[in-house]
Image (tube, rainbow, N blue to C red):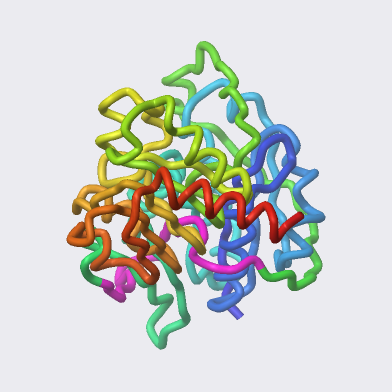
Amino acid sequence: MAEVLVYVDHVDGAVRKPTLELLTLARRIGEPVAVALGNGAADTAAALAEHGAVKVLTHEASEYTDYLVVPKVDALQAAVEVVSAGGSLAAVLVPSSAEGKEIAARLALRIGSGIITDAVDLEAGDEGPVATQSVFAASFTTKSRVIKGTPVITVKPNSASVEAAPAAGAVEALSVSFSDKATGTKVTGRTPRESTGRPELTEAAIVVSGGRGVNGAENFSIIEALADSLGAAVGASRAAVDAGWYPHTNQVGQTGKSVSPQLYIANGISGAIQHRAGMQTSKTIVAVNKDAEAPIFDLVDYGVVGDLFDVVPQLTEEIKARKG
């Protein structure tokens, strides 16, 4: 069976959820071979093996921390060459983060292959892996495959359920020679992001968002309370962000972040195409809006026509009561 390279997104050895989702998808088209780079790379092996990695290629070097994406591209290129020399390589899968998409694009250019970004599903095909994408502001769903070289595919978080499938997870050291360009852009400083205790927006299974109808930064506490009762991430529409009510890092939409959670709750959001483009692939969508003609209701699975200041606190209390 052909092997599938999976780029591992981890923090000091702690594997992030999108990588485990990639392993689930990789098993549909071949045998997953994980590539873990940087500090703590070897510590990822147990989690990766538990979720289907037959092999874990590791390489630790300061370049992965000290410089931007080129060292990681060098390493992935080395992994492609190693796996291709020893057998058949079906695809390279990378999480669809901003960094992941840059890594994937650079890698595809180097190895002369086609690239598919922001896939939401993956399946085996007679002529190679077939990726499903949600395109044109999520108005259409397409299926496509790469016809030149080894497919390089980035996959959006929450596109697949994490499934355990214990495998060998044999750890092998990857030999990497960094290119001259690897040290071209140096990281001069890092500032830890202040933790809210909530899930990462793009990875969260549940997202609760607020829009223009929240009517002020001070009222976002209502949205946060609902999110906290559900263990959810907090999002915001462009209107709320532009008004300064919530940080830009939490913006959901075409000019913000794209999310695809199991449950998306939109509060006081009209449903402009800009916002819909960032959340339309959510599995279940609920909206609360006092305007019965709001475009968001054309999209939802469940809609509540009502004032969010009445509805959302009641919903929060009911959730707390059922949990408590």
Give the residue displayed 43% in from the left and 55% down from the top.
265
Measured as percent of width and height from the top left, residue 20 is found at 64, 59
Measured as percent of width and height from the top left, residue 282 is found at 41, 63
Above or below residue 50? Residue 227 is: above
Which quadrant of the figure contains the C terminus?
bottom right
Give the residue displayed 41% in from the left and 88% down from the top.
126
Give the residue displayed 23% in from the left and 68% down from the top.
298
Which is more toward the observer, 42 or 260?
260
Measured as percent of width and height from the top left, residue 237 is found at 31, 41
Query: What secondary structure do most residues of the magenta stretch adopt?
Result: loop
Image position of 154 (left or right of 273): right
Residue 77 visible in the displayed image:
no
Image position of 200 (left or right of 39): left
Which is more toward the observer, 98 or 260?
260
Range shown magenta: 141-162
Residue 142 in magenta stretch: yes
